[in-house]
Amino acid sequence: MTKKVLIVGEVRDGELRNVSLEAIAAGKTVADGGEVVGVLLGENVNPLVNSLLYYGADRVVAVNHADLKSYTTDAYQQALLQVIESENPDGLILGHTALGKDVSPRLAMKLNAGLISDAVAIGKDGEEIVFTRPIYSGKAFEKKKVKEGIVFATIRPNNIPSLEKDETRTGEITYLTVELKDLRTVIKDVVRKATGGVDLSEAKVIVAGGRGVKNKEGFKSLQDLADVLGGAIGASRGACDADYCDYSLQIGQTGKVVTPDLYFAIGISGAIQHLAGMSNSKVIVAINKDPEAPIFEVADYGIVGDLFEVVPILTEELKSA
Ligand code: FAD
């Protein structure tokens, strides 16, 4: 049965996040030939509406409001509820990002809907839509269907490929005015730490270091490798606890969950809590001097050796490739 599905386009620093484009592709499967409507919220989202159309949205609802400039739970929840009321969709999809994780359960509760969070694949079983999501820290996958009500889900970045960009695509744009009341939080200013540019959760290549990297200096050689590959730097908790790098880089059960195309685990033992955040990466390369390190059990390629010798050689080889 065809459906109308809303996807929430997430804007960061004036640009759409990749996961929003992936959400359009997810929305196409859920809509099953029906309509995928992109929703954009922000202070001035008008320059971005075409991007959603180019990547497959059939229509866009744009909501411009000064209080939507930065994400706050109150403002986004109120605005999205008004969009949902005006569109009356059968489905709603967001990225499984900080924004999606925060607002989606609140919306689901208000709509009396179920929520499938952190989906990594969406398929069909007859007429029904089936979501696949990791459980037990990525050791198993479960399949879930929505039996009644709105089909409501968040999708993990880097798992559902976006559609090809087609700049000839056009679609209707609706500008919706929303009323935001009694906001309890207002963001006055956002001060970001400099983290090298590539967003960890959406990076296609991650070079992660562990306690084996020994110190802050050691991370510099990992940065060189990441720069050659256009990747982001990540870390184990061991490295963060030892103050070799910032906690914002931590990957794992209590850090970020990532699914890059290529993950380098360098001087990381492969504790279960670390694997919880990266074991679903498409290709894993481990560099460790201990041949018995558990990381080799999940690695596609393993190099047994001293990282201080291996990483510079690898970086030079890749530079000249
Ligand atoms: P280690 O276990 O000390 O491993 C260092 C590795 O480096 C070793 O395998 C060693 O052989 C190798 N090495 C050393 N020198 C070299 C060299 N010169 N060349 C090559 N290899 C070398 N951990 C996380 O990562 N993320 C989490 O989110 C997380 N959450 C946790 C939550 C809880 C509740 C708990 C209890 C723990 C959590 N941990 C987490 C910690 C986790 O259990 C491990 O302690 C941590 O992952 C170990 O980090 P590491 O692999 O860098 O260090």
Image (cartoon, rainbow, N blue to C red):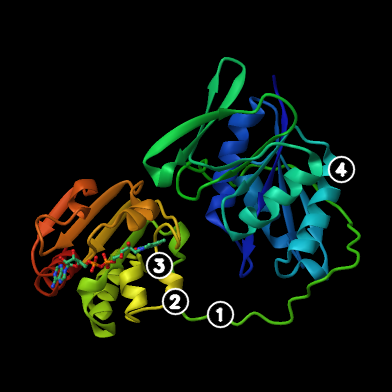
> Looking at this view, is 201 or 5 the one in front?
201
Q: Residues within 10 Å of mark 1 (few under 14, many from 20)?
A: few
Give the Cα distance between marks 4 and 3.
Answer: 39 Å
Q: Amino acid at mark 1?
A: Arg
Q: Amino acid at mark 3?
A: Gln
Question: Which residue in the protein does label 2 denote?
Answer: 195
Ligand 1 within 8 Å, label 2 CB: no
Q: Compared to 50, does 194 lie above or below?
A: below
Which x, y percent locates residue 15? Answer: 60, 63
| Circles 1, 3 touching at the beta carbon (< 8 Å) | no
| Circles 1, 2 touching at the beta carbon (< 8 Å) | yes
The numbered mark at residue 319 is none
The numbered mark at residue 250 is 3
> In the rendered structure, which disc, 1 or 3, sits on the residue that comes first in sequence?
1
The numbered mark at residue 192 is 1
Tell me, yes or no, if residue 104 can be seen here.
Answer: yes
> Looking at this view, is 269 or 51 the one in front?
269
Question: Which residue in the protein does label 4 denote?
Answer: 85
Mark in the foreground, 2 or 3: 3
Residue at 82% in and 49% down:
81
Q: Compared to 163, does 32 lie above or below?
A: above
Ligand 1 within 8 Å, label 3 CB: yes
> In the rendered structure, which disc, 4 or 3, sits on the residue that comes first in sequence?
4
Name the image quarter holding the C terminus.
Answer: bottom left
Disc count in the image?
Answer: 4
> Looking at this view, is 136 or 235 the one in front?
136
